[in-house]
Amino acid sequence: MRDSFIKALTELAEIDPRVVLITGDLGFGVLTDFANNRPDQFINAGVAEQNMTALAAGMALEGARAYTYSIANFTTLRCLEQLRNDVCYHEADVTAVSVGGGFSYGQLGMSHFATEDLAIMRALPNMTVVAPSDPWQALELTRQLHARGGPAYLRLDKDKAGLEPAPASVVLGKVREVRAGADAVIFATGAILGEALAAAETLAAEGAAVRVVDVHTLKPLDVEGVVAIASECGVVVTVEEHNKLGGLGGAIAEACLEGGAKVRSFRRVGLSDLYPTIVGDQKFLRRAYEMDAPAIAAVVRDALKAAG
Amino acid sequence: MGELGAKANVADTEALALRLRRHVVRMTHRGNSSHVGSALSMADIMAVLYGRVLRVDPSQPKWPGRDRFILSKGHAGACVYAALAERGFFPVEQLEQHYSNGSVLSGHVSHKGVPGVELSTGSLGHGLGVGGGMAKQLRRLGGNQRVFVVLSDGECDEGSNWEAILFASHHRLDNLVAIIDYNKIQSLASVAETLALEPFADKWTAFGWAVRRVDGHDHAALHAVLDGAPLESGKPTVIIADTTKGKGVSFMEDSVLWHYRSPQGEEYENALAELAGGA
């Protein structure tokens, strides 16, 4: 996904001289071509994320279109107040890009797990929050985000959902149905969408037609689309590689309740408000923390049972 | 009232400083707000900047060729509002709304609805980083505008400043000018007792900045050093301005108390009496 982001940004930088990519000293091998080919549009701010973000805000206030880039929490939580005060309050055209959503860096340990970022970025006024599910979608959403302008947060996964490219089906701010069904719906964000699809496949064999919906844009949330789909299916499960609190599950619950969706049962799949203490690859950790396809299928079965 | 702008002389900016002091005492009195000592401390710096040094056009607050000014020590926002009003960015009468219900003139400086404010601050350690970004981008675009950032001494405890200090010298941002309002007193106690900054000038020098130390209440000295800013080609400039917290009101000077206390009753009358004058 990060390669797709860089590909899209390289194209954008060629036609838009206002684009500046600012890294917090990360991106070895990934940013090299960009840095070499467009030195005037590239800054390595060093291991100094507060300044990286303040700098991006200052450049944006003077007409640049700034992208900050680092791993997981370093473009978000480490410099949260710079995002809040300098970027969001000033409506500065800054896009914070995190590589390594969720457990992407699963062997590196808790410091490198991005499992609260969606909730926290969502809480910032003026912020657009996007988590693509596939590399081709990251490419498309980078272009659409650029057209919209910052402030924005782009969360990139190491994994991918594995869906066939269909860029025309991706519209920033709109949910995307990726599997039909009306017995229940799974709303998923990020590459863990692949696990949701596998769960739906399992459930289909058991006779349950489960719709799967890709929520690549958490904010602004497609409230109308979410409410309509939730009402059609009645049984709602959310899936995110993130804490259960305040992220996708929270956003969908808020939309359903306020929008008067006819929901008979509702469940969230995600981290149960804890910090993982073991390491492993992304798929291992999803299994360990009950967020993989079998765990999702079990939650959907439970939700279907509760709905009667 | 004397002339403001590039031709303003020492008497003009001194008169402006006196008016700024009266405004901030009235504003903090009316609003029953804190930080009068911090605002008085930098009144002379602000008077010299807005009275003479900054290339700005009050009729076009967003004129692209303007110098940028950021108050990083946002708690002294009353002094920025006063300076902007005196310079003609908005009516002086509007200062009466400071700190009041429904006002845009917040205790900590905000750009929303206030012409001339470049950056909203209040949390310390933000202004120099954003100012560095502005200076970098203005340089990329080939402009000759300067970016001035006023910081407090206590604010230099914030690590984000030192990130920005590293960045500015590495990128040779000689269009960036930091001014430290070095009144030696922070929130609860003296700087020396809290987190000592000395040898302060040496630290900036070691970080690659051009450094000048100046009496922050001496208008002739401020004119001389700020007229010449930036001081050196290829280096960002820092002016360490030795100041007195609460300057101009005898019983507020050098006192931690007046970081928080609002002048009321007899204290208010006495403060205004000390600031009476022909300006």
Image (cartoon, coloured by chain):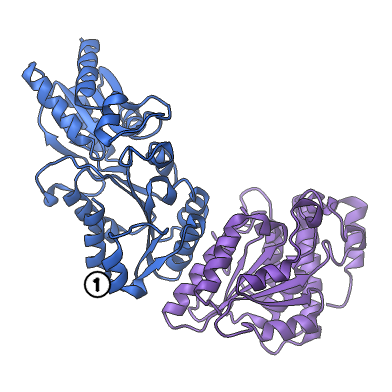
Chain colours: A blue, B purple
Q: Position of residue B255 (x, y in %)?
A: 87, 55
* Residue A235 visible in the shown view: no
Q: Where is residue B240 in the image (x, y as percent from the top left)?
A: 73, 72
Residue A288, above or below A222? above
Asked if residue B34 lies left or right of residue B176, the reply is: right
- Pick the residue in front: B278 or A251: A251
Name the residue: 22% across, 61% down: A8
Identify the subunit bearing mark 1: A
Q: Residue A191 occupies which quadrant of the picture?
A: top left
Type of the residue with mark 1:
Glu
Instruction: Describe residue B30's horizontal placement relative to residue B148 as left or right.
Output: right
Residue in view at x 35 percent, y 71 percent: A41
The foreground one among A307 and A195 is A195
The relative height of residue B128 versus residue A262 in the rendered view (above or below) is below
Q: In this view, does B94 lie to the left or right of B25?
A: left
Residue B241 visible in the picture: yes
Q: Residues within 10 Å of mark 1 (few under 14, many from 20)?
A: few
Describe the element under mark 1 as helix, strand or loop. helix
